[in-house]
Amino acid sequence: MGIADSAVEVRASGWRTLAALHGHIEGALERELVRRHELSVVEFTVLDALSRQDGWHMRMSQLARAAALSSSATTRLVNRLEDRGLLTRVLCADDRRGIYTELTDRGWALYREAAPTHDEVLAESLESAGDVPELAPLVEFLHRKEPARA
């Protein structure tokens, strides 16, 4: 195996490890968020993204990027969340073609209820992943503090 082949294998191995860690965490989050709050991981991601916005709304295209979804999948997801009374759509005052999505009071309440579950399960999942030999180096890397910058 040449140097270029080794570099390719290192990247591929790193990607497989990252994907395995993501799957480990996402599976645990999905189970607990659905069980405790009837909320999927991607639904929580949307509520979380909206909760972090100044003014508490986002354009649909921004929401699609935040949730890592296509525009059509985002529209379907927003429709479901809107049907549940968690989100509402608002026309942009400056551009009538623009549509914003924002949390309703009910959406805020569910987000606040689910956020501690998300944080708890994320911490537990990272801890348990640290016990898996293939995942331990990546978990250790994620727990390192960023060095102070001058």
Image (tube, grey):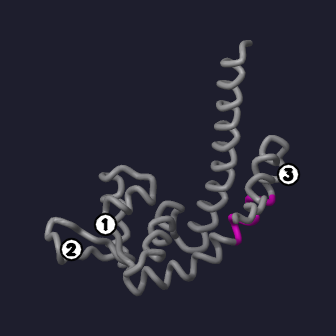
- The tally of labels here is 3
| The one of 39 and 57 positioned closer to us in this rendering | 57
Pointer 2 local density, CA inside 10 Å: few below 14, some 14–19, many at least 20: few
Left-right relation of 134 to 50: right
Dot 1 corresponds to which residue? Answer: 59
Q: Name the residue under label 3.
A: 131
Quadrant (top left/top right/bottom left/bottom right) for the N terminus? top right
Horizontal and vertical percent for residue 41? 54, 62
> Which quadrant is the C terminus positioned in?
bottom right
* Quarter occupied by residue 62: bottom left
Location of mark 2 (residue):
92
- Nearer the N terminus, badge 1 or badge 3? 1
Q: Which mark is residue 16?
A: none
Residue 67: say if magenta: no
Query: Is 60 or 30 nearer to us in this picture?
Result: 60
Q: Which amino acid does label 3 sit on?
A: Asp
- Mark 3 packing: few (<14 Cα in 10 Å), some, or many (20+)? few
Magenta span: chief secondary structure = helix
Question: For numbered disc 2, what is the local secondary structure?
Answer: loop
Amino acid beneath label 2: Cys
Q: Residue 94, position in %: x, y?
A: 17, 74
Label 1: state its secondary structure. strand
Can residue 83 be seen here? The reply is no
Query: Residue at (45%, 53%) from the top-left corner?
Result: 68
Where residue 60 sits, quadrant-wise, is: bottom left
Q: Is residue 79 above or below residue 14?
A: below
Find numbered disc 3 in the image and state the secondary structure of the residue it sits on.
loop
Q: Do the residues labelled 2 and 1 touch (CB within 8 Å)?
A: yes
Which span is picked out in magenta?
Answer: 120-127
Of the two numbered discs 3 and 2 on the same chain, state the one appearing first in sequence: 2
Is 123 a magenta residue? Answer: yes
